[in-house]
Image (cartoon, helix red, strand yellow):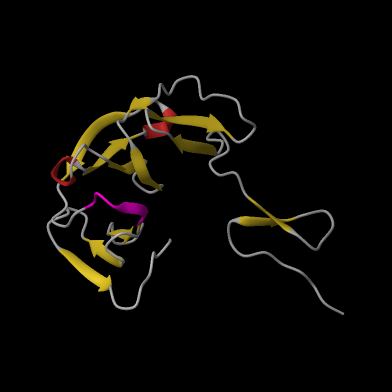
C-alpha cells in the first residue's frame, strides 16, 4: 500500500494521485506575460486581458523573465546595433501596471541573446547567446559578467 502526498505549494487532488499548485495569494491569480516585437502584455491564463495593465512599449524583445519575489519583469530590448541593445526592467506591483522602468547596463554584448533567466535567490541574470555560442551570467547590477560556457557549444538554447 502507498500514500501520495504533494510538495509544499501544491494540493493533493480528489483522485489522491495528482497535485495542483496552490493559488497563493488567492487574490492574485496567475498571469502570462507575452512579448512580441512591439510590446509586453499580460493576460490571465484563460486568455482574458489583465485590465489594469497596459502593454509596455518595446522595440524588439528577444528574451524575458519575471522575478516573482520583486514583482519585476526584465527583457532584452534589441536596438539597431549591438551598443543599443540593453536589458530593461519594470516593476509590476500587485498587477497594477508597468512602473519604474529602468535600464541595466550589461558589460557584455546582448545583441544575440535569445534566452535569459533571473535567479530569484541571487538576482543574477543568466543569458544564452546563440550566435557567439556561449552562456554567461551577470550580477544584479550588470557590472560583473562571467562567461560560464563557450567551448563546443553550437547554437545553444535555453
> Which image quarter holds the N terminus?
bottom right
> Which image quarter holds the C terminus?
bottom left
Q: Horizontally, is 44 left or right of 110 in the view?
A: right
Q: Is residue 144 above or below residue 3?
A: above
Residue 152 picture location, percent across and down: 34, 78
Q: Is residue 93 above or below residue 126?
A: above
- Quadrant in which residue 15 is drawn: bottom right
- Most frequent secondary structure within the magenta stretch: strand
Observer-nearest residue: 77 or 49? 77
Q: Horizontally, is 145 left or right of 93 in the view?
A: left
Residue 112 is a magenta residue: yes
- Quadrant in which residue 146 is drawn: bottom left
Residue 39 picture location, percent across and down: 38, 29
Residue shown at 17% from the left, 54% from the top: 142
Residue shown at 38% from the left, 32% from the top: 37
Residue 132 visible within the image: yes
Q: Is residue 21 above or below residue 74?
A: below
Magenta residues, start to end: 110-117
Residue 23 is a magenta residue: no
Residue 101 picture location, percent across and down: 24, 32
Residue 43 picture location, percent across and down: 53, 30
Observer-nearest residue: 153 or 16? 153
Residue shown at 31% from the left, 30% from the top: 58
How many tags in the picture?
A: 0
Residue 97 visible within the image: no
Amino acid at each position: 500500500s502507498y500514500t501520495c502526498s504533494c510538495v509544499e505549494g501544491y494540493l493533493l487532488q480528489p483522485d489522491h494521485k495528482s497535485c495542483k499548485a496552490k493559488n497563493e495569494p488567492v487574490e492574485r491569480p496567475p498571469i502570462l506575460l507575452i512579448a512580441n516585437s512591439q510590446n509586453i502584455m499580460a493576460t490571465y491564463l484563460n486568455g482574458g486581458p489583465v485590465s489594469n495593465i497596459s502593454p509596455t512599449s518595446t522595440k524588439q524583445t528577444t528574451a524575458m523573465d519575471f522575478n516573482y519575489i520583486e514583482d519585476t519583469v526584465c527583457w532584452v530590448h534589441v536596438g539597431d546595433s549591438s551598443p543599443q541593445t540593453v536589458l530593461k526592467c519594470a516593476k509590476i506591483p500587485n498587477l497594477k501596471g508597468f512602473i519604474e522602468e529602468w535600464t541595466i547596463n550589461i558589460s557584455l554584448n546582448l545583441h544575440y541573446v535569445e534566452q535569459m533567466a533571473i535567479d530569484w535567490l541571487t538576482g543574477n541574470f543568466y543569458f544564452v547567446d546563440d550566435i557567439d555560442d556561449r552562456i554567461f551570467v551577470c550580477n544584479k547590477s550588470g557590472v560583473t559578467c562571467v562567461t560560464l560556457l563557450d567551448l563546443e557549444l553550437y547554437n545553444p538554447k535555453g
